């Protein structure tokens, strides 16, 4: 990522933040912003976290959910690029929605974003803990062991984020190297030397499937929807990026495009290398990725694979925490959260939002105390729904702004295609929110697990209305409108 650090304070493109608050230093350039977006989405996490779910839901043809979802998310990324170019402030979706449509819109986007990403931090730490214990040859870790290691990962990751931007850059570089080896190189090896299934396999469904093609593919798209989230993280650190009006939009778009291409390539490689695919689909259990790699490359690959998984999930944790902490900071700077004065303070030689970072660690750590419980299982699904709602609010706001004829583009602009792309992105997000939210019966699960998306949305929505009502009269004007 190179020597990109500057101690010059961040200046807002259309007005600086209020003088009563500190300003963030610009410590990132285009490559750093792109790397952060890449690590946040993470090809390893994007593929391996949902591969089994998609395969068991729709069979090998679940692969086609990847290009469909990627196309929809690319529309969103292009809209985000325009919004980030117009309003390059810390907090991404919060700032974009608020400047485009008003405080209530921005606050709604931020509330969904904060909860969705904080729950994601918890799940990433928990997954990384499982892989790390596997590296240490702990075959059947207890719930206490998983919780303890997860809390340790949260603590170490938080410390790395608090120390400064240079540490974050180094760790993300390490993660990208692992991503290349774990995704691209392994994919090439599988395709060239270990392909056992014909390409036509990609068009096959489940054997003796009772559900129709459309219903199973919709479910696969709901799972894959989680894989292509995080590209907006480059916008969350906009005030820390040099020339954010131009660099942040490019990082958002290229980050998603790079990860999407790698994930689809890796998915094809794994599907075509699965030994005895009909048996795997009939069993509907286990980890087909690990089993395939072990069968094709030998047991010696298991531990290096686990190490790559740990690095991939930890680096994604760091990137997600960077994004959500900047959203906390951006809201606190505006007085939009309880304890705003404390959360808006910056500290250290690099002027980092230490308290905002710490808050995300505390809340995600508290969630882990409930890991394995029904409450946790109900809430954790909001890590998929929350970001989609947070994405939809600024995109809908941008669509309404265009319809009113008041849209003014920034340096990054889609020109005459901007309106079409914005309306298409809004339609895509509306569809995917309904698809993700729709209750689906899971065999052997109680009703509240099947309705977990709806329950978590209603519960967090009620709490959000109460918090917003208590803060609405204390919220200052948008950053871009301050003199």
Image (cartoon, helix red, strand yellow):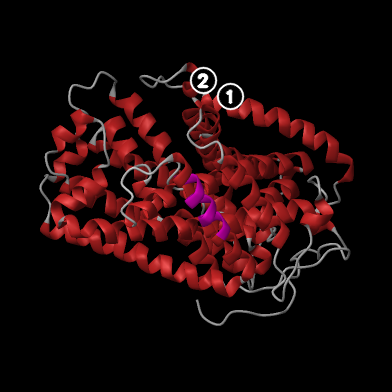
Residue 412: image location, x then y, percent = 60, 62
Front one among 294 and 390 = 294
Residue 439: image location, x then y, percent = 47, 22
Residue 467: image location, x then y, percent = 78, 36
Mark 1, mark 2: which one is toward the viewer? 2
Rendered position, 102 above or below 307: above
Query: Quadrant location of residue 64?
Result: top left
Circle number at residue 455: 1
Instruction: Answer with left or right where residue 2 lies relative to residue 457.
Output: left
Instruction: Answer with left or right where residue 444 lies relative to residue 125.
Output: left
Taken as a whole, is the magenta stretch helix, strand or loop? helix
- The residue carrying mark 2 is 448
Instruction: Answer with left or right where residue 197 lies relative to residue 288.
Output: left
Query: In the picture, which quadrant includes the C terminus?
Result: bottom right
Q: Residue at x 12, y 55 (%)?
A: 194
Magenta segment? 146-155
**151 magenta-colored:** yes
* Residue 414 visible, this orientation: no
Direction bottom: furthest residue: 3
Q: Residue at x 32, y 27 (%)?
A: 216
Question: Could you tell me how far apart the alpha carbons at marks 1 and 2 are, in whole angstroms?
Answer: 8 Å
SS at mark 2? helix
Front one among 113 and 133 = 133
Rendered position, 432 above or below 253: above
């Amino acid at each position: 990522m190179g020597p990109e650090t500057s101690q010059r304070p961040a200046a807002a493109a259309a007005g600086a933040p209020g003088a009563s608050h500190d300003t963030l230093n610009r410590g990132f350039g285009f490559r750093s912003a792109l790397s952060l977006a890449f690590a946040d989405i993470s090809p390893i996490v994007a593929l391996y976290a949902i591969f089994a779910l998609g395969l068991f839901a729709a069979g090998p043809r679940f692969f086609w959910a990847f290009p469909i979802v990627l196309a929809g998310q690319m529309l969103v990324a292009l809209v985000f690029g325009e919004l980030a170019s117009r309003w390059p402030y810390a907090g991404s979706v919060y700032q974009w929605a608020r400047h485009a449509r008003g405080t209530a819109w921005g606050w709604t986007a931020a509330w969904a974003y904060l909860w969705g990403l904080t729950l994601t931090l918890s799940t990433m730490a928990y997954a990384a803990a499982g892989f790390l214990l596997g590296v240490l040859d702990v075959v059947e870790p207890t719930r206490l062991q998983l919780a303890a290691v997860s809390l340790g990962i949260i603590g170490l990751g938080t410390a790395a984020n608090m120390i400064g931007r240079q540490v974050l850059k180094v760790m993300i570089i390490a993660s990208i190297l692992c991503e290349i080896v774990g995704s691209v190189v392994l994919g090439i090896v599988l395709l060239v030397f270990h392909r056992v299934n014909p390409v036509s396999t990609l068009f096959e469904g489940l054997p003796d499937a009772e559900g129709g093609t459309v219903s199973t593919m919709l479910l696969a798209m709901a799972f894959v929807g989680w894989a292509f989230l995080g590209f907006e993280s480059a916008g969350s650190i906009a005030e820390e990026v040099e020339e954010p009006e131009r660099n942040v939009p490019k990082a958002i778009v290229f980050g998603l495009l790079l990860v999407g291409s790698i994930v689809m390539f890796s998915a094809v490689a794994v599907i075509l290398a699965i030994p005895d695919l009909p048996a795997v689909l009939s069993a509907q259990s286990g980890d087909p990725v690990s089993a395939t790699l072990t069968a094709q490359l030998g047991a010696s690959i298991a531990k290096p694979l686990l190490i790559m998984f740990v690095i991939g999930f930890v680096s994604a944790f760091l990137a997600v925490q960077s994004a959500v902490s900047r959203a906390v900071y951006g809201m606190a700077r505006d007085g939009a959260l309880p304890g705003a004065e404390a959360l808006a303070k910056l500290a250290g030689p690099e002027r980092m939002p230490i308290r905002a970072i710490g808050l995300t660690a505390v809340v995600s750590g508290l969630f882990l105390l409930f890991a394995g419980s029904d409450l946790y299982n109900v809430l954790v699904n909001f890590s998929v729904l929350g970001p989609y709602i947070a994405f939809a609010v600024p995109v809908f706001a941008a669509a309404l702004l265009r319809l009113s004829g008041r849209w003014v583009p920034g340096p990054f602009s889609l020109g005459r295609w901007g309106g079409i792309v914005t309306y298409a992105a809004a339609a895509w997000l509306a569809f995917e929110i309904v698809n993700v939210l729709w209750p689906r019966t899971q065999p052997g699960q109680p009703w509240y697990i099947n309705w977990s998306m709806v329950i978590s949305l209603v519960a967090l929505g009620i709490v959000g209305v109460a918090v917003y009502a208590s803060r609405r009269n204390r919220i200052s004007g948008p950053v871009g409108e301050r003199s």
